[in-house]
Image (tube, coloured by chain):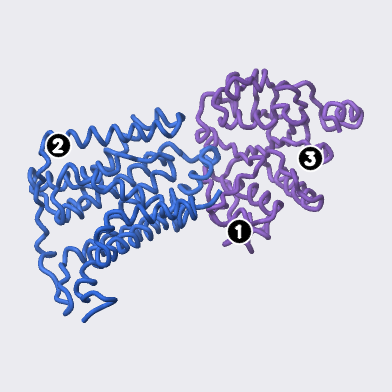
Amino acid sequence: MTDTLLQTKNLQAWYGESHILHGIEFSVPKGQIVTLLGRNGAGKTTTLRSIMGLVKNRTGSVVHEGTETIKLASNQIAKRGIAYCPEERGIFSSLNVKENLQLPPVIADGGMSEERVYELFPILKTRGNSQGTKLSGGEQQMLAIARILRTGAQLLLLDEPTEGLAPVIVQQIGEIIKRLKDEGFTILLVEQNFRFAERMGDVHYVIEHGEVVDRFERAEIANNREKITGYLGV
Amino acid sequence: MDFLGVPFPVFAGQLLIGLINGAFYAVLSLGLALIFGLLNIVNFAHGALYMVGAFVAFLLLDILGIGYWPALLLSPIIVGLFGMVIERFLLRPIADLDHLYGLLLTFGLALLIEGFFRQMYGVSGETYAIPSILQGGFNLGFMFLPTYRAWVIVAAIIVCGATWFLIEQTRLGATMRAAVENADLVRAFGVNVPLLVTLTYGLGVALAAFAGVLAAPIYSVNPLMGSNIIIVVFAIVVIGGLGSIKGAIISGFLLGLCEGLTRVYYPEASNIVIFVVMAIVLVVRPAGLFGKTA
């Protein structure tokens, strides 16, 4: 039996008057890649932001390694070992590549050394003094992932890491994510690109209108492809 | 000997006065820019806190016999801590409201602080002696350079340089700059951004207090000394670019010099020249000389 690293129950979230999440429930087993699939506006990003404490108005339960985190501030959640890579990548324009990389504080032992990060992302080493936002989209995505690997966090929340990237870069990002899994990281991946997500994920949850409407193990994908593409409108 | 149509000693003297004013402008506008950058608050209490810095130095000497040099360190610490209390208990609760509320709150605070010191000490001002080691001056041949005024310029350059180094060259500074851009994400990386904001406000206020201690021996320690200078400092921050550290420092010194030179060639305009420059900058480059355009 696999240990559960993160579990949400009846997770609800609001932006102002808008009720976005209507009781999201799923679990993330340790060492696996779990994907959240769904159309635009389904509530995938809000789910990640709620787990990370970035949505102020949220209720329900988010349990990380047996501890309830729903009432914690986002910096306290991060210090528990959860790292977040946002959809828009969040590269800081006033910081160069090296400063962006070193920005997140180390919160636990076992984070990657800078040398190891550069080994995974060699392009970043050559761009250390460049302004972060002057990098290409693919390089920015690599930087966004690289900087959370230094922190020692073991659960990575990746929000659409392939969005807007060329196929060859998508393939590179995919290889890196698989490598991270092999090294023991647990990954919660939000994706709209189903072809990418199905190659990555061990478990897939489909979200519609702020609710989980279906769940598939990797082995179940082949028999349910039509159903899933129907959910996603692809 | 004439220089550009005026006797050189007159020219150099006004240039020196401009540089001294510029030193105060630079330190004060640097504090304001720091606070605006991270909190997005136009800190109207800045002038009052500059005045409090001068008064703390005066009171340390008057009551405890603590002289200028310890006061140069103690006053910024005391006023900085007071600033942190203001941020934590008055500004943080309204942080999510429109920034106009912050402006109004700090304006009210400025009136309160100033009113308190007026009530206690009147408006005639208190004298604060120049420390013995900085008394006297140098005869440069064409003019007499008072040692204390030279020290003010040097001290301002050192403090501005150190603050620039902190913000631009250290990890703490990088975190502060990142928090200016996207505070939520920096917090999601595990950084205690509310504490960072409190410390930044404290640092900005400490800079104002430092300028107040520097000013104490030159101007009388007076409850109105902050309100006399703060509008000019706001104009300098706007000219430099709201929130720009480099802009605040360079504009502070340059506009002090500009004011001094105007006093040589067209004295009637010396009190308004900074506002004229501000108007021109706002028309030509609304983000300021060193501000980032949207």
Q: Residue furthest bottom?
A: B1
- Residue A115, by quadrant, is bottom right
Query: Which residue in the protein does label 1 denote?
Result: A115
Q: Look at chain B in the picture and name its colour.
A: blue
Q: Nearer the viewer, mark 3 or mark 1?
A: 3
Q: Amino acid at mark 3?
A: Met
Residue A149 or residue A125, whichever sits in front: A125
Answer whether labels 3 and 2 touch (C-beta < 8 Å). no
Residue position for label 3: A200
Q: What residue is disc 2 on? A: B118
Above-or-below relation of A96 to B11: above
Instruction: Tell me the residue at 24%/46% (across/down).
Output: B50
Q: Position of residue A215 (x, y in %)?
A: 79, 25
Which chain has been coloured purple in this picture?
A
**Marks 3 and 2, how far apart at CA:** 70 Å
Looking at the image, residue A8 lies above or below residue B176 = above
Pick whichever, A209 or A6, lies toward us: A209
Q: Is residue B193 left or right of residue B91?
A: right
